[in-house]
Image (cartoon, rainbow, N blue to C red):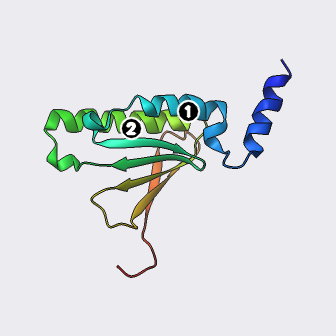
Amino acid sequence: MRLMPVTVLVLLFLPGAGYAATPAGVVLGGECRQIDPKQTGFTCTLRRQGLALRWIEKQSAMPAERQERSMYEFNKIILRYFDLGGRAFEVTADFWPAAAKRTCYALKPSYRTYTCVDEKSSQAQ
């Protein structure tokens, strides 16, 4: 019984460890793998820092029913991430400028809503 907490602590201090190495990260990683980018238009990856979502298809190019399903899956994985202790996630898109990304942060106290900040590289494009 005591071995479990020690194992988790050891995993957290290994190189490359982070959220993805926690029990919550293992669960969310499994849920990310269940997302089908061909159906949803986005990919889901769990990185050391947390959740990373990448749009591979513009929603405006999707039929209405597929847009609805896509947003459902997108928001479902975000809410699950927050339920499992995540507090910030990153969104990128294949059709955005190369260095563009959006970082989103959970708002207290419920953590079921979030706000996002658009970030761009300081390099000229």
Across and down, in percent, residue 98 comes to: 36, 66
Mark 1–mark 2 CB contact (< 8 Å): no
Quadrant in the picture for residue 97 = bottom left
Q: Residue at x 45, y 39 (%)?
A: 78
Q: Considering only order in the chain, which callout, 2 or 1, is on the residue closer to the N terminus?
A: 2
Q: Which mark is residue 74?
A: none
Give the residue pinned by disc 1: 83
Quadrant in the picture for residue 67 = top left
Mark 1: few, some, or many residues within 10 Å (few <14, many ≥20)?
some
Looking at the picture, which amino acid does disc 1 mark? Asp
SS label for mark 1: helix
Assign the N terminus to one quadrant of the image: top right
Quadrant in the picture for residue 72 = top left
Q: Residue at x 47, y 35 (%)?
A: 79
Mark 2: few, some, or many residues within 10 Å (few <14, many ≥20)?
few
From this view, report whether residue 3 is shown above or below residue 124: above
- Residue 71 placement, left or right of 111: left
SS label for mark 2: helix
- Residue 6 placement, left or right of 83: right
Q: Which mark is residue 75?
A: 2
Assign the C terminus to one quadrant of the image: bottom left
Across and down, in percent, residue 82 comes to: 54, 38
Looking at the picture, which amino acid does disc 2 mark? Asn
